[in-house]
Image (cartoon, rainbow, N blue to C red):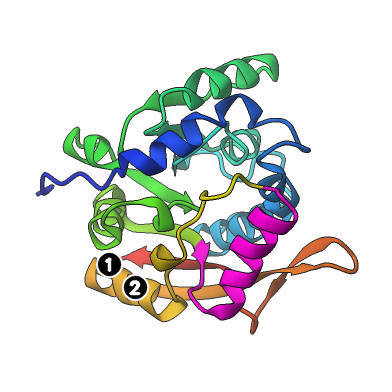
Amino acid sequence: MHRETNTVDPAEVAKFEAMAAEWWDPHGKFKPLHMMNPVRLDYITRQIAAEFGRDLAAERPFDGLRLLDIGCGGGLLSEPMTRLGATVVGADAAARNIPVARLHAQAQGLDIDYRHTTAEALAAAGEVFDIVLAMEIVEHVADPQAFVTTCRELLKPGGLMIASTINRNTKSFLAAIIGAEWVMRWLPKGTHDWAKFITPDELFGLMRAAELDPIDRKGFVFNPVSWRWSISDRDLSVNYVAAGLRR
């Protein structure tokens, strides 16, 4: 049974409300996500294909799968997941993100169910999914354990959760806050709170406590020379992603 909790942090929501109009500007405040999106998509699609036995060479390999993109923002992941055949619900607690996402999807001819709602509200309504994506959101919620537990409740048995976040160490402070916010000015100052970053072991612990089985984790690594992101089996020192299955 769903426990009545609220993991939304109003201050965090306000940050993204203020930037909503820039979601689809690759040179705007969400430039880091646009740059990272190819490796995020690579990891997500490969993980889904592996767990659900899908052929990525097919035209719509994710047909028949229902996917929740929680914290969907402007739809940077919801749109490609829809193109791959998934039935997508994009949910965000920031109200101003939803019309931006809807208008962009309509312009692309995509049918995506965007909602201004929370994970808790979806769980309370009895919604269930094959896949829950929680990308770059765990570090912004008020109660990470309650949030991961709610994501688990939103999964069908055997369902897959994929979550990406930022490690908590000196390197991540230098890269994600000093570098991205202060030096490069990719993001407004104050977008991230280093104290809310989560280590890979902590995220696996949150998954286990929520009765998810952690099955994989990888690093997303930025190369300042090639100016590109890549996936790493070993380097989880700053950005990383983890996957877990509902028991």
**SS type, badge 2:** strand
Q: Is residue 158 left or right of residue 122?
A: right
One can see residue 238 in this view: no
- Residue lying at 62% horizontally and 38% vertically, measured from the top left: 76
3D distance between C-alphas at marks 2 and 1: 7 Å
Q: Are marks 2 and 1 in contact (CB under 8 Å)?
A: yes
Q: Is residue 181 above or below residue 168?
A: above
Residue, disc 2 = 213
- Given residues 21 and 53, the one toward you in this image is 21
State the SS at label 1: loop
Three-letter amino acid code at the position of disc 1: Arg
Classify 177 as above or below 57.
Answer: below
Quadrant placement of the C terminus: bottom left
Going 47% across and 30% down the picture, which residue do you hit? 17
In the image, residue 143 sits, relative to residue 79, either above or below, namely below
Residue 29, by quadrant, is top right
**Sequence order check, earlier mark of 2 and 1:** 2
Which of the 4 image quarters holds residue 79?
top right
- Looking at the rendered structure, the kind of residue marked 2 is Asp
Q: Over which residues does the magenta segment extend?
A: 165-186
- The residue where tag 1 is placed is 247
